């Protein structure tokens, strides 16, 4: 008989952890392929349509980058909170409120020049998202209310609030009854980079990503985050202001998701409408965990998961695979990556008895 | 408001509270063993779809209901594999299960959207349904509602009066001590996960077999998350879960009635009610130090010992 022995690794696995990730991704894709064939789509054909749809042409790669922008920002925010073991699953709602905040500015002051209007929209989006993230943080700090459920419930509330606005007070009178706001004025739109279809939001990602990376890596706050994330009690003994850290982290997290909402409203659809909510806030959790909360890896992972979304859209068009297929792959990736964590933080040995 | 309005409303509260009650009881059972399963929503929706498909194929709602329970159990087993075998983070694993479950149900369920399956119909209890007020509120429902009247006392008995139940709680309160006392903590946690998942599957099946009789995408609509919140509201006690579930059933029934009555209030604001109430209920429970009642080792994986 065999016996499995698991011991904690003293030092985390280095480069081999990439192998574990690759194996997890391969397993998820294999299982998804199986599910494809269950509904009558040949697995290999399906997966190849998915890949070609995502990375097969310049247009497809540009589409991936466009979708990677909101994913990256949401995920960066989620990762900052997760580092402190604060389970912010409210990126979706913070994103929604960010889009609402930006839209409010764009609709209220359409005549302002772009160099004032865009920063105002960004500030409002970050403020709205940040405040929405602050509610669960304050509740947690004051009353120890469970932030997982509160952030999730606030998602539903934020999305319904967005619906309320676009179905009601903000509805474009000339939209033939469709729930959408009027189109933003040209000054309120983030432009495209050169002749590509990619918007300048990509540059925002670069700047914000580097800023967060520097904060995590080189500042006192970054150190406090890491210390408090490892052990709350030890952090308190060391005099780290844990409660203030929780609020700060949630505000930053919400502000980043709100920023993503601004980019989607301004650059991608040029107005606010319910279809802006496509679940980036939830995919961001998969991205953050896949990237093990590291900003640089988040950039890579958000590109991959954006590719998955583009690929699934292609599957839907070409082979009539339901859009929910994307959720299956995301769930599988998250589960397999989690399970793979065993091999990176523990040593697993099989011995003969 | 007179009794002609209030009694049907309360009866509707019991009915729409029932799926939440099944799920809440399941999550209480799981959490008592020390495992946090945030995949309630995923287990529920998989149970809902399985129940629907089986009822459609066999024409037997009872069989469909039982198999839906096992489907919920299978879904929760995924959480068990990731958390108990692979020591994965319980919060993230539960989230992943919810994403996967919703994906699977909407993917496999596309061809069933709009179809109608045979389900459970109201069966008034003889004599009891004749009691004024209480009769129509509690005893004029489908049999699945009556089933939930028996589960909380039984679960309470199990958790407080049986050796197995006490051991399961020991695994959730202090796994190291439980291990030292010779208990197999992993086995009790598996029991918590699987039995809990069974109830979550039943809750989902209630939605597709008794509440709607038809399949739509995202049928559960966040009820699984409400159940997670209700566990805290109930202080992990099966009896209190009943009140919580009916409270939410009431608010959902009220919201539907207001919408149907052609009120001036926009429907999106009405739809917010249950979610806003969840936040309020949670805040109130934390105000009363509810979280202190949580099993001490909730959400903490047992580290392997050398």
Image (cartoon, grey):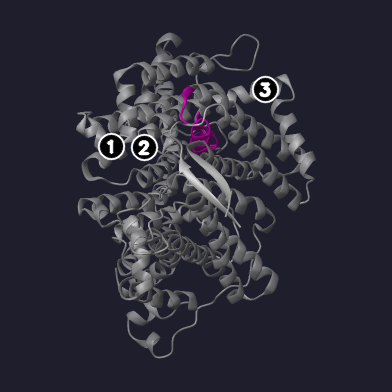
Asked if disc 2 and disc 1 are in contact, CB closer than 8 Å, the reply is: yes
Which badge, 2 or 1, comes first in the chain's sequence? 2
Residue beneath disc 2 = A85
Is disc 1 placed on a helix, strand or loop? helix
Tell me the residue at 65%/44% (across/down).
A325
Q: Chain of mark 1?
A: A
Which numbered mark, 3 or 1, is in the foreground of this view?
1
Q: In this rendering, would A38 be left or right of B14?
A: right
Asked if residue A273 is among those painted magenta in the image, a careful observer would answer yes
Which badge, 3 or 1, comes first in the chain's sequence? 3
Q: In this rendering, would B280 be left or right of B34?
A: left
Judged from this view, the residue extending furthest toward the bottom is B127
* Percent position of residue A86, x then y: 35, 37
How much space separates mark 2 and mark 3, taking CA atoms?
34 Å
Judged from this view, the residue extending furthest toward the front is A353
**Which segment did they paint magenta?**
A271-295
Residue beneath disc 3 = A61
Tell me the residue at 38%/24% (across/down).
A126
Is disc 2 placed on a helix, strand or loop? loop
């Amino acid at each position: 008989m065999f016996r499995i022995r698991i011991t904690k690794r003293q030092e985390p696995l280095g480069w081999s952890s990439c192998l574990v990730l690759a194996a997890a991704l391969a397993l998820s894709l294999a299982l998804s392929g199986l599910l494809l064939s269950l509904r009558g789509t040949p697995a290999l054909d399906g997966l190849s349509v998915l890949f070609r749809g995502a990375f097969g042409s310049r247009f497809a790669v540009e589409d991936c980058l466009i979708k990677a922008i909101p994913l990256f920002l949401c995920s960066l925010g989620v990762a900052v909170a997760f580092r402190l073991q604060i389970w912010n699953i409210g990126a979706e709602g913070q994103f929604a409120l960010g889009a609402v905040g930006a839209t409010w500015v764009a609709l209220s002051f359409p005549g302002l020049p772009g160099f004032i209007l865009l920063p105002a929209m960004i500030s409002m989006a970050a403020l709205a998202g940040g405040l929405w993230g602050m509610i669960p943080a304050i509740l947690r700090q004051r009353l120890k209310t469970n932030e997982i459920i509160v952030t999730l419930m606030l998602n539903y509330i934020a999305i319904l609030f967005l619906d309320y606005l676009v179905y009601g007070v903000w509805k474009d009178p000339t939209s033939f009854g469709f729930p959408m706001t009027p189109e933003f004025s040209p000054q309120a739109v983030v432009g495209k980079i050169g002749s590509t279809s990619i918007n300048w939001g990509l540059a925002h990602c670069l700047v914000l990503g580097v800023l967060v990376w520097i904060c995590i890596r080189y500042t006192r706050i970054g150190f406090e985050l890491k210390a408090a994330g490892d052990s709350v009690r030890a952090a308190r003994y060391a005099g780290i202001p844990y409660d203030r850290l929780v609020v700060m982290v949630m505000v930053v997290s919400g502000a980043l998701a709100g920023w993503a909402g601004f980019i989607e409203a301004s650059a991608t659809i040029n107005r606010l409408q319910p279809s802006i909510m496509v679940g980036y806030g939830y995919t961001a959790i998969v991205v953050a965990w896949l990237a093990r909360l590291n900003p640089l890896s988040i950039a890579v992972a958000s590109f991959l998961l954006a590719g998955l979304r583009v690929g699934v859209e292609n599957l839907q068009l070409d082979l009539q695979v339901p859009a929910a297929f994307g959720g299956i792959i995301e769930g599988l990736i998250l589960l397999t990556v989690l399970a793979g964590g065993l091999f990176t933080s523990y040593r697993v040995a099989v011995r003969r008895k | 408001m007179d009794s002609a309005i209030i009694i049907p409303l309360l009866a509707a509260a019991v009915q729409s509270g029932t799926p939440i009650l099944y799920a809440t009881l399941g999550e209480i059972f799981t959490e008592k063993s020390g495992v946090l399963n945030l995949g309630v929503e995923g287990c529920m929706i998989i149970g809902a779809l399985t129940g629907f498909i089986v009822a459609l194929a066999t024409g037997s709602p009872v069989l469909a209901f039982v198999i839906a329970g096992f489907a919920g159990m299978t879904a929760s087993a995924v959480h068990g594999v990731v958390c108990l075998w692979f020591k994965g983070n319980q919060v993230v694993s539960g989230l992943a299960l919810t994403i996967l479950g919703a994906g699977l149900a909407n993917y496999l369920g596309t061809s069933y959207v709009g179809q109608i399956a045979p389900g459970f119909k109201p069966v008034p209890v003889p004599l009891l349904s004749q009691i004024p007020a209480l009769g129509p509120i509690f005893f004029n429902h489908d049999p699945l509602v009556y089933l939930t009247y028996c589960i909380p006392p039984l679960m309470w008995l199990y958790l407080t009066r049986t050796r197995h139940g006490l051991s399961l709680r020991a695994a959730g309160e202090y796994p190291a001590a439980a291990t030292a006392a010779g208990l197999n903590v992993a086995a009790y946690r598996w029991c918590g996960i699987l039995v809990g998942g069974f109830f979550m599957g039943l809750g989902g099946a209630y939605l597709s077999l008794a509440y709607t009789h038809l399949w739509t995408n995202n049928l559960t609509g966040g009820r699984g998350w409400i159940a997670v919140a209700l566990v805290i509201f109930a202080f992990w006690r099966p009896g209190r879960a009943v009140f919580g579930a009916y409270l939410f059933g009431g608010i959902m029934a009220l919201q539907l009635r207001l919408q149907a009555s052609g009120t001036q209030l926009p429907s999106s604001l009405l739809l917010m009610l249950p979610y806003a109430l969840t936040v309020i209920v949670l805040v109130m429970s934390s105000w009363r130090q509810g979280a202190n009642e949580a099993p001490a080792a909730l959400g903490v994986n047992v580290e392997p010992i050398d």
